[in-house]
Amino acid sequence: MPATYPEKVTQDSRSRYLGVALALSRLGVHITRTFTELLGPLGLSTSQAAIVRILGHRDHVTQQEVADLLGFPPARAGELIDELRGANWVEIGDEQPDSVSLSRSGRELYARLLHEAATFEAQLLSVLTEDEASSLFELLRRVEAAAGLHEDRLAPETLAASVRL
């Protein structure tokens, strides 16, 4: 049964409902800040890391597909892809010139990125049991869906299976 919100806000209801939103917001800021710091030594911005994540999971992705998956304007996706190409992490497809894939060094970068992200998440969730962490993940996915956020077409369980660390 879904949570019901009181018609009249009381001190008790205010602390429960505003507390969840505040906790999620504070965690979001912490996670974003920490993940950005984690990417620094890898030489990636968060936007570039998102593209590496996509290309690590799927070969021969077009700039338009990258833009659609991330919700970026195509021109911005193109700029980011060009930056990744300049670092020799991404290469243009031979058979499909409108597509890009990770280069050998890009695949190595992707493996490091996944390792760092998994380590960070393990540290973040270390206060939870495995069952609690799984429950939290499922609950957050339901809240995301209810909020109208698009489903992640590159879910963590799919990504983890795509690279051997």
Image (spheres, rainbow, N blue to C red):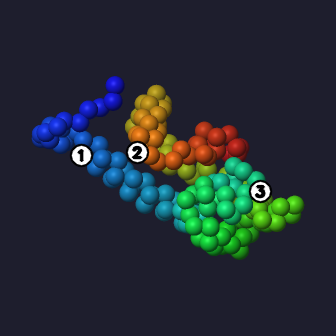
- Disc 2, SS: loop
- In the depicted structure, whether residue 2 falls above or below residue 88: above
> Is 59 positioned to the left or the right of 151 in the image?
right
Decide if residue 113 is on the left or right side of residue 15: right
Instruction: Kindly identify which residue carries mark 2.
Output: 147
In whole angstroms, how far apart are the C-alphas of marks 3 and 2? 32 Å
Mark 3 or mark 2: whose residue is earlier in sequence: 3
**Disc 1 residue crowd, few under 14, some 14–19, many 20+, Cα 10 Å:** few
Is residue 120 something that shows in the picture?
A: yes
Q: Which of marks 1 and 2 is in front?
A: 2
Q: What residue type is labelled 3?
A: His
Judged from the image, the secondary structure of the residue bearing numbered disc 3 is loop
What secondary structure is found at the residue carrying circle 1? helix
Sequence order check, earlier mark of 1 and 2: 1
Image coordinates for residue 99, horizontal then vertical, percent: 76, 62
78 shown above or below 121? below
Which residue lies under the disc numbered 3? Answer: 60
Q: Distance between the residues labelled 1 and 2?
A: 16 Å
Disc 3 vs disc 2: Cβ atoms closer than 8 Å?
no
- Numbered tag placed on residue 18 in the rendering: 1
- Residue 135 or 148: which is nearer the viewer? 148
* Residue 77 in the image, given as x and y percentages of width and height: 62, 67
The quarter of the image holding the N terminus is top left
What's the distance in space between the residues labelled 1 and 3, CA to CA?
44 Å
Q: Is the Cβ of the residue at disc 1 closer than 8 Å to that at disc 2?
A: no
Nearer to us in this view, 80 or 109: 80
